[in-house]
Image (spheres, rainbow, N blue to C red):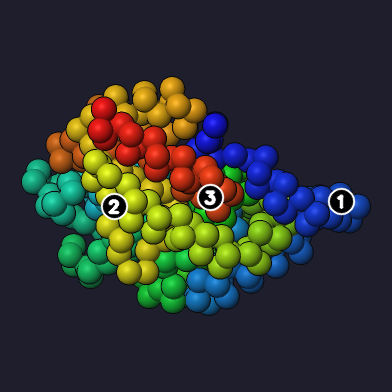
Amino acid sequence: MNVRFFDPSKDYLRFKKGYDAAWESVNMRGDLILRQDVEEFEQRLLNYVGTKYAVAVSSGTDALYLSLKALGIKGGVALPSYTFKATCGAVLNAGAIPVIYDMDGIIKQPFPKIEAHIPVHITGELSELKNIFGNVPIIEDSAQALGAVKNPTTSAQCWSFYPAKILGAKGDAGAVTTNNYSIYEYIKEARNHFKTDNRDFGGNYRMDNLQAALLNIKIRHIDKILARRQEIAEKYLEKLEGVGLPNNQKGRVWQDFIIYTEKRDALGDFLKEQGIETMRNEYPFSPQYPKLPLTVKYEAETLRIPCNENLTDEEVDYVIEKINEFAFL
């Protein structure tokens, strides 16, 4: 049996009728850039998340970047070492300074004044949102947490709809949700070069209208998608042996399922031989802003295994069988 970590063809076949109709509709209307499908998706997203505003943009990375720009952040931005490098990269690209803390939540080196905090809900597990750095704006990196973050009160929430995400498009796409009108209005103009506004230059950070049309099909099924992922995760939590398991935190969602073992590389190689695709849980930063020791150790000993709504029961059982088999080799 072959079990892919994520199979785009299964997603397409699952929603084929709706996807094909959306593709035809967009092309027949000629609505390619910032048209009704984008506006409809923004409305669906803000209703689902529970905010006043939503702005569809080109990626989750650009959502972070634009949120920092909207807030005028130029000083220190606190962020965890345990995250994908896009979080840190967005801070640097916005002209601010990353201030990185390890998995113990402690900053151990001298740092500039903190002007904002970016907690990251990695793999759908909710991060601590207490304002431990003073009364500064909080921008949530929610790229992997759609469904977990509801009715937020932070400054902004940044979403990714990269194909393998919980709500995946067929290319790059992202969004910012917020209750702050000034953030919303700035990003809405910045994503389109401040075309009719001379305050700044902005750039091309638009969500493609076709991606919005496809996401409008899929978001209608988001509760079923999350429920199936939860079902798979609970099966893993109940039946996997010989590996450390993730936190089954109340309210979390399952973007990915991460297992812990000091034999990570051997297990990954074994599963590959058995036809199971996994992902190493490592995302190194640049030497200028290296990842911190606890994070490095944790990432070197963890593995992401398939956990998405398109897996069959037979595939899930096969993954469990082979991981448990490895535990007793």
> Looking at the picture, how far across and down is residue 132, in whole percent?
17, 65
Identify the residue position indicated by label 3 in the image: 313
Vertical placement of 252 versus 61: above or below?
below
State the SS at label 3: helix
Q: Are marks 1 and 2 in contact (CB under 8 Å)?
A: no
* Mark closer to the observer (1, 2): 2
Identify the residue position indicated by label 1 in the image: 24
Task: Check residue 60 in the rendering and tell me which mark sits there, or answer none.
Answer: none
Left or right: 68, with 119 as reference point:
right
State the SS at label 1: helix
State the SS at label 2: loop
CA gap between label 3 and label 1 equals 33 Å
Which circle's residue, 3 or 2, is located before the other in the chain?
2
Residue shown at the point (43%, 22%) measured from the top left? 273
Which circle's residue, 1 or 2, is located before the other in the chain?
1
Within-10-Å neighbours for mark 2: few <14, some 14–19, many 20+: some
* Mark closer to the observer (3, 2): 3
- Residue nearest the observer in this picture, 15 or 44: 15
Residue shown at the point (37%, 25%) measured from the top left? 270
CA gap between label 3 and label 2 equals 21 Å
Q: Which three-letter amino acid code belongs to the residue tagged 1?
A: Glu
Identify the residue position indicated by label 2 in the image: 246
- Specify the quadrant that holds the C terminus: top left
Vertical placement of 164 versus 148: above or below?
above
